[in-house]
Image: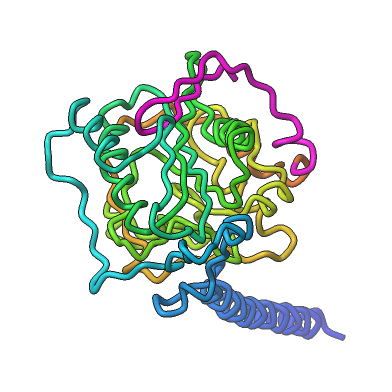
Amino acid sequence: MSPELFMYKVFRKLLHSFKARLLFLFFSSCLFIVIYRYVLSLSCAKIIPLQEIPHNLVPAISNLKSVTEDKQLCDIMPMLINGTWPPPNVNINDVYLNNLAIQSNVQPGGSWKPSTCVSQHHVAIVICYRDRESQLNTFLAHMHPFLQFQQLSYQIFIIEQTHQRPFNRAKLFNVGFREAELVSPFHCYIFQDVDLLPINIHNIYGCTKLPRHLSANIDVFEYKVPYDWIFGGAVSILKSQFVSVNGFSNKFYGWGGEDDDFFNRVTRNGTTICRFEPEVSKYIMLPHKKEVPNEDRYYYLTTGGRRFESDGLNSLKYTVKKIDLKPLYTRIQVDL
């Protein structure tokens, strides 16, 4: 075989190989795009339309035992025509809040239940907190009338981190769960940031069959879900479900990552979260100063699966410094 023919055959093989690779890359890219779009089309959350909400709520069995001839069950979901519940447009000060506590018959420590019927919900609302008094006052002025219209049996717990280490939101929620357990056998827990206010009364502050992301549609995100697996801001979960996932991680000092870690805990065994339809899940966010980011949050998030069973409620350590039964809430100051 002449050298020219040999080189020609080698060139043909190389050209064929190159074309094959290009073809392979082309079809691989197309397949990747198809798969990627399919994955994006799959929602991490079940969306519950307004008319289906009552069928997805889980009543508190212990409350149902209190029904008598004179006191029947409250509606599991009171309704308004359009559901809109705007925040209070008043000067909120101590006098206003004290009058609110007296007029609405809120008990010391921030507990309340309907007097004319038996609530189907028994809820602990746990708020993590540090140095946000103005936001807290607005939250209390908005939430107590909101919760009372929904005819809930509830109590508000403000868990305050006293030391100056970076803020540990998730660990404070674990503390709130443990401390609330000592107060009453709540069947449902709401974990929420103090700077978020729900503005649709149909957003029931009770628990659904699936863990629920309450604050799905916030004004600062143009009332859109930022990413599908977001599970922060405000969430509700049954006590049994929270215990089964070992609560939140205790590792996340500083801003970020703990809510995604909690999503991974909740969904690791195939459980799905849910959200109410966008109009019902609307919130406004109060102006606030950002916390210092946690530089290690990505490490703890990516390695979280190794620690789900060892990092959480069963490893929680804290020191209660003071408990105050305020007119509109229970204040628990802790060192972490």
The answer to which of 186 and 313 lies nearer the viewer is: 186
Q: Is residue 318 magenta?
A: yes
Whole-percent x and y of residue 233?
Answer: 44, 47
Relative to 290, is 285 above or below?
below
- Of the 4 image quadrants, the one containing the C terminus is top right
Mark yes or no: residue 287 visible.
no
| Residue 80: quarter of image | bottom left
- Residue 194 in sight from this viewpoint: yes
Q: Which residues are magenta?
A: 308-336
Counting the numbered discs, the total is: 0
User: Relative to residue 154, is residue 99 drawn left or right?
Assistant: left
Residue 74 falls left or right of residue 82: right
Q: Residue at x 36, y 67 (%)?
A: 78
- Compare residues 146 and 183 and report the one nearer the observer: 183
- Please, is residue 141 above or below residue 68 in the view? above
Q: Residue 273 magenta-drawn?
A: no
In the rendering, at what x and y percent does residue 55 appear?
52, 76
Which colour assignment does the render follow?
rainbow
Residue 28, position as x, y percentages in the image: 64, 77
Q: What residue appears at the point 64 percent right and 32 percent down from the top-left corner? A: 250
Q: Residue furthest front?
A: 69
Please identify the quadrant where the N terminus is shown: bottom right
In depth, the one of 311 and 63 nearer the eye is: 63
Give the quarter of the image for residue 321.
top right
Q: Give the answer, above or below, for where 154 lies relative to 159.
A: below
**At x 62% / y 66%, what residue is drawn?**
272
Measured as percent of width and height from the top left, residue 293 is found at 47, 31
Foreground pick, 178 / 289: 178
Taking the view exactly as shown, the residue that stands out farthest to the right is 1
